[in-house]
Image: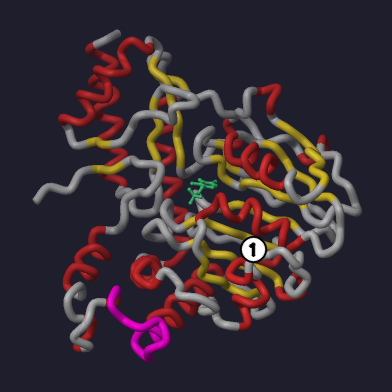
Amino acid sequence: MTRVFNFSAGPAALPESVLRQAADEMLDWKGSGMSVMEMSHRGKEYMAIHAQAEADFRELLAIPANYKVLFLQGGGLAQNAIVPMNLLRGKTSADFVNTGEWMKKSIKEAQHFCKVNVAATAEASNFTCVPKQSTWKLDPDAAYVHICTNETIGGVEYHWVPDTGKVPLVADMSSHILSRPIDVSQYGLIYAGAQKNIGPAGLTIVIVREDLLGNAMPITPAVFDYHQQADNDSMYNTPPTYAVYIAGLVFQWLKAQGGLKAMEVHNRTKAALLYGYLDSGSFYSNPVAKEDRSLMNVPFKLKNESLDEAFLKGAQALKLMQLKGHRSVGGMRASIYNAMPVEGVKALVEYMKEFASQHA
Ligand SMILES: *Cc1c(COP(=O)(O)O)cnc(C)c1O
């Protein structure tokens, strides 16, 4: 068996020890004689797995008691509709800060439900920065302010938390949740699809402040009504049980690594290695403003794009996989989530140096 260094943006690499444990427990979970996949979601075994996963997730992020954690389905994109259905609460508009591809999708979807105010946009810079808060035109009557704290395609990350006063802040954290500590109390709602930094595709986690619940639009499907799901411990319908189980193993792995403070050190080390090398010459380049660069997703271009194919082929030969950039921007992208070891980034940088010297 050979494991590769997997730089995929998502679904993405998982810790090897998690996969090994899942393999060990595949046919017989702790003497139950069943795989977790085969268990009733209402049985005591699965209920314990589910409760432990939630408890560990709360502990990792230090989630205050007045926030609900929901394990849902539908992915990050479904939340673009589910958030307005639940959080408009009789109001008619919401604010958005356009930082790139993922926010564009949020804005488009919300237009079906309310008036969309784009309070700021990074379009003029071709989405290579986070607009400074001093330029935001927030509406004090907005139902909420929606941001994407890590633009997975552009590689742009918020390294600060906007102040939206009494208006709840909603954040799509799909591609950097659990990468470092955050102060949950500064947000009204956080959501994340699991397949970047949490676990398998199919699970979507929502963290929502309790006082925002209970006013969903009447058309809201019951399975997407946060209040109904919260009242039923995310078991209004069948949750994505196996994905929750794997996510739970990832949470235990994170705790064993030292929690999110240790993860931040690990992630900053990797990002510094890669950006440090990118900035050291002119063969490769990353267009993002230095203070807004993502610790998780590092897009970069080669000086001469006719070398892209050769670069990818050489990388593959060294088991450095899934480095091709998103089709909308081209070039390369290295996603270096929690599960990417420092050795993987070192191997990538070594290869990049070698390739640059051969094609200078
Ligand atoms: C991947 C991603 C999504 C989309 O998630 P799906 O599960 O495919 O719906 C949304 N937002 C961000 C920031 C992402 O990285």
Q: Where is residue 201 in the image (x, y as percent from the top left)?
A: 40, 56
Instruction: Kindly identify the residue that appears in the image at 37 percent across and 91 percent down.
Output: 44
Front-most of 332 and 73? 73
Q: Is residue 47 magenta?
A: yes
Q: Quadrant of the C terminus?
A: top left
| Residue underneath mark 1 | 183
Residue 60 lies, with reference to residue 358, above or below; the image says below
Chosen colour scheme: secondary structure
- Judged left or right of residue 318, residue 87 is right
Over which residues does the magenta segment extend? 37-48
Task: Give the quarter of the image for residue 187.
Answer: bottom right
Look at the picture and state if 224 lies above or below 150: below
Left or right? Give the position of 15 relative to 66.
left
Instruction: Where is residue 320? Give x, y as percent.
Output: 24, 36
Identify the residue at horizontal 50%, vertical 35% (top origin).
153
| Relative to 260, 12 lies left or right | left
- 227 falls in the magenta region: no
Element type where label 1 sits in the image = loop
Residue drawn at x 65%, y 53% as measured from the top left: 81
